[in-house]
Image: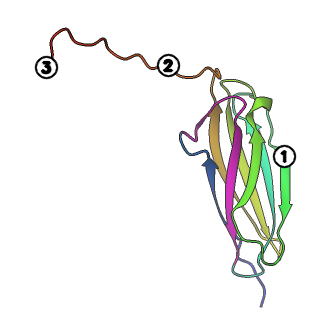
Amino acid sequence: RYDVTPPTVSLSIDPSVNPSYVIPGQIVKVDTYAADQGSGVARVEARLKDLDDPGAKYELIDQKTVFAGDMPPFIFSIDSANLKLNHAYQFRATVYDGAGNSREATIAFRIAPTADKPTITLPEDPAAPI
């Protein structure tokens, strides 16, 4: 039986507090869920592109060979300290099965403009109790 069906793939970002807004210096983990019912998942490639740079291209940042018994998610880590502040990035995973079929998925995130901790300002105590 010949496998012509591409694998399935979905992505999520950790930490999930605000996955689209990353604090500079934070390690971004991209969980790649890939499966293939035919010939099985053979490898997963990870690429990253700066969406705010008009001339940017996807750059290969890592790849994982999948062996029998390996279970998803396949985790890719990105050190945001190496990325530009206040820029949006798109992570692209390409999953290949044993027959050479492939499928891609993308997920975007933005690097915060600063690593400053947020401040919370509370109102003053009311003069008279409510």
**Residue 94 x %, y %:** 76, 58
- The residue at which mark 1 appears reads as 61
**Residue name at image x 81 percent, y 78 percent:** 68
Most foreground residue, 41 or 128: 128
| Residue 106, disc | none
Task: Say which of marks 1 and 3 sits in front.
Answer: 3
For mark 1, give the secondary structure.
Answer: strand
The answer to which of 46 and 25 lies nearer the viewer is: 25
Q: Secondary structure at mark 2?
A: loop
If the image is split into quadrants, where does the C terminus sit?
top left
Residue, x 76% and y 77% (percent of image)?
Answer: 40
State the CA–CA distance, disc 2 to disc 1: 34 Å
Q: Residue furthest bottom?
A: 1
Q: Is residue 28 magenta?
A: yes
Residue 130 has which mark? 3
Residue 129 against residue 72 in the figure, above or below: above
Q: Earlier in the sequence, mark 2 or mark 3?
A: 2
The answer to whether 1 is drawn above or below residue 81 in the figure is below
Identify the image's colour scheme: rainbow, by chain, secondary structure or one colour. rainbow
Q: Is residue 105 visible?
A: yes
Q: CA distance from mark 1 to mark 3?
A: 58 Å
- The residue stretch that appears in magenta: 18-36
Q: Amino acid at mark 2?
A: Thr
Q: Which residue is mark 2?
A: 119
Q: Is residue 95 above or below residue 67?
A: above
User: Which of the 4 image quarters holds residue 2?
Assistant: bottom right
